[in-house]
Image (tube, helix red, strand yellow):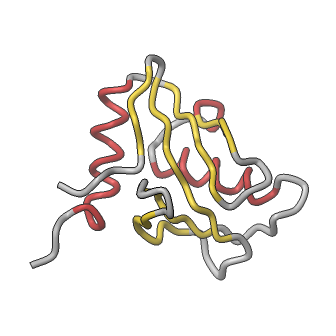
């Protein structure tokens, strides 16, 4: 199975994200490999990268996709960067299963 863009932590998960602001629609684009060899979830948001608007759009989109309250999804690192680390609070095992399901289209090896 390919690498996944998140790690389980004591109070939830940490998700590596690469954001594309000012996109035509808000959506998950797929998994991308970084220069460091790590994997990140590539996400497009329609908001511009100004005054935290793109960050807020990203966190709201992730909360919707994971069926969580917005307050459970916070920015841990990368406020001024396209590369971000998002903390998702909750039951780590349940969140990991849910994220694996959301990521299935990109994490399944193609034949």
Question: Would residue 10 be found to the left or right of residue 110 on screen?
Answer: right
Question: Would residue 15 be found to the left or right of residue 92 on screen?
Answer: right
Q: Position of residue 12 (x, y in %)?
A: 45, 26
Q: Quadrant of the N terminus?
A: bottom left
Vertical order, 110 against 93 (above or below): below
Image point 44% across, 67% down: which residue? 32
Q: Position of residue 86 (x, y in %)?
A: 58, 41
Image point 32% across, 42% down: which residue? 98
Quarter of the view holding residue 111: bottom left
Question: Would residue 95 be found to the left or right of residue 77 on screen?
Answer: left
- The foreground one among 91 and 79 is 79
- The foreground one among 63 and 87 is 87
- Which residue appears farthest toward the left when viewing the image? 111
Image point 43% across, 64% down: which residue? 33
Quarter of the view holding residue 47: bottom right
Q: Position of residue 77 (x, y in %)?
A: 68, 41
- The foreground one among 21 and 63 is 21
């Amino acid at each position: 199975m390919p690498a996944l863009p998140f790690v389980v932590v004591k109070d939830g998960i940490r998700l590596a994200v690469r954001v594309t602001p000012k996109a035509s629609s808000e959506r998950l684009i797929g998994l991308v490999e970084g220069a460091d060899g790590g994997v990140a979830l590539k996400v497009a948001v329609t908001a511009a990268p100004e005054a935290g608007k793109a960050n807020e759009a990203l966190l709201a989109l992730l909360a919707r996709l994971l069926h969580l309250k917005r307050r459970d999804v916070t920015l841990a690192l990368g406020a001024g960067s396209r590369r971000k680390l998002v903390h998702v609070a909750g039951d780590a095992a349940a969140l990991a299963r849910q994220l694996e399901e959301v990521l299935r289209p990109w994490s399944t090896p193609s034949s």
